[in-house]
Amino acid sequence: MPNKTTLPDAFSFLDRSNAISDGINEKWAASNEQWWDWYLSLAHDDGSEPEPDVAAPPLPAFSPPSLPELAEELDSAYRLPQESIEFFRREGFVKLKHVCSPASLLLLRSALENLFARALGDTTAMRFPSLEMMWTIDPIARAFVLSRRLARIAAELLGVDSVRLYHDNALSKLPGCGRTPWHYDAHHYPIASENVVTVWVPLQPTPRAMGPLAFARCIESWRRVADLPFSKFDDSYDRGIAAALRDGGIAVEDGPFELGEVSFHHTRSLHTAGPNRSSLPRMALATTYLEAGARLVESPTLISGDFEKFMPDVKPGEPIASHLNPVVYGSRAAS
Ligand SMILES: O=C(O)CCC(=O)C(=O)O
C-alpha cells in the first residue's frame, strides 16, 4: 500500500533561471512534464496523517476494439441533453455518463501505460507523470484526441461552430501522490478567448479515494480569486482559493466517476483533485479544445509552461492554427 508522499518544495522543480525572481512574466524554462511536478508542489498539504489507503476497484476484463471500431465509436455523435448544456453554462463544468465504452477506455489506458514506460522508464521515481502530444505518435491516443464525438460535445457546450485542438495531456497520479491545487485554466493557458474547454477522461472507475477531478459550482466563482496573488514558490494561491470558496459558501462537486463517464470544464471553472489513496495509478486523458479563430495572448507567462510546443511558429496576437492545432469538429472555413 502506498505511503503518503512528501513532494520536494516548489523551488526544486523550477529551472534556476525561473527561481531568481518571484515574478511570473518570464518564459517557462523546463519541460511540460516538470511543469506538472512543479504545479502539484503548490498544493496545500495540511500535514495530517493520510486517511487509510484503499484497494482500487479491479479493472474489468475487456476485449479490445479494433482501430476501425474505435474510430467508429469516437466519431459517432453523442446525444447531448439541453439540460447538460444549460448546466455547463451555469456551473462551468458538466459530467456526462456513457460517453466512451469501457473497452475503448481500457485500451487507451494500456496504450498510455506503454507510452509512459517508453518515455519515462521507471515512473515510480515521479508522483505525477504526464505526457503530451501522444496523438502525433500513437493511433489509439489519436483516435481519442481527434475524436469528433468529444470535440462536438465541446463545441455544443461552448456554443461555437468549430473547435481546434490546443493540447492533449496524459496524467498518471501514482498511489500516494497528493492533491492537485485549486486553479482555473484561463489563469495559465495563453489563449485570448473564453471559448476553451477541457475534456477529462478517466481511464478506470474513479472513486473519491483516487482523487477524481472536482469542481467549484458556478461559472462565476473565479471572480472571487481574480485578484489573488500567485506565488510560484508556495501553496498560498491554492490556500487562497480554498478560503475564498469556503467564505463564499461555494459548493464543490467532488464525486466519483464511473468508467465511461467524462467531464468537460470551462477555462474559467475552478477545479482541484484529491490525493490518490488507492493502490492503482489514477490515469486520465485531458484534452483541451479552443474555439477556431482564438489567438495567442500578447504576453504569455511562466504559468503557461512550454506552450510553444503545441503551436509552433504562432506569434503573440496570431490565431492558434498551426499544423498541431487541427480543426477537430466543424468547418475549417471558420478559422
Ligand atoms: O488530473 C488532475 O489532477 C488535474 C487535471 C487538470 O487540472 C486539468 O486537466 O485541467
Image: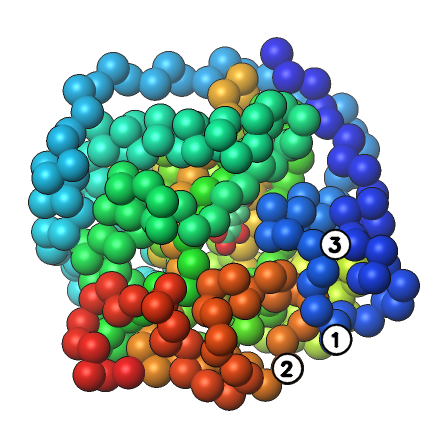
Residue 111 vs 330, above or below: the answer is above
Which residue does the image show at 67% across and 72% down from the upper left?
Answer: 301
Mark 3 vs 2, N-terminal side = 3
- Nearest to the eye among marks 3 and 2: give it: 2
Regarding mark 1 in the picture, which secondary structure is present there?
loop
Where is residue 163? Give x, y as percent: 29, 70
Q: Quadrant of residue 80?
A: bottom left
Type of the residue with mark 1? Asn
From the image, tell me which residue sits under label 2: 299
Q: CA distance from mark 3 to mark 2?
A: 26 Å
Ligand 1 within 8 Å of the CB at mark 3: no
Q: Is residue 307 left or right of residue 318?
A: right
For the C terminus, the image quarter is bottom left
From the image, tell me which residue sits under label 3: 239
Q: Are marks 1 and 3 in contact (CB under 8 Å)?
A: no
Q: Are marks 1 and 2 in contact (CB under 8 Å)?
A: yes
Where is residue 24? Give x, y as percent: 76, 70
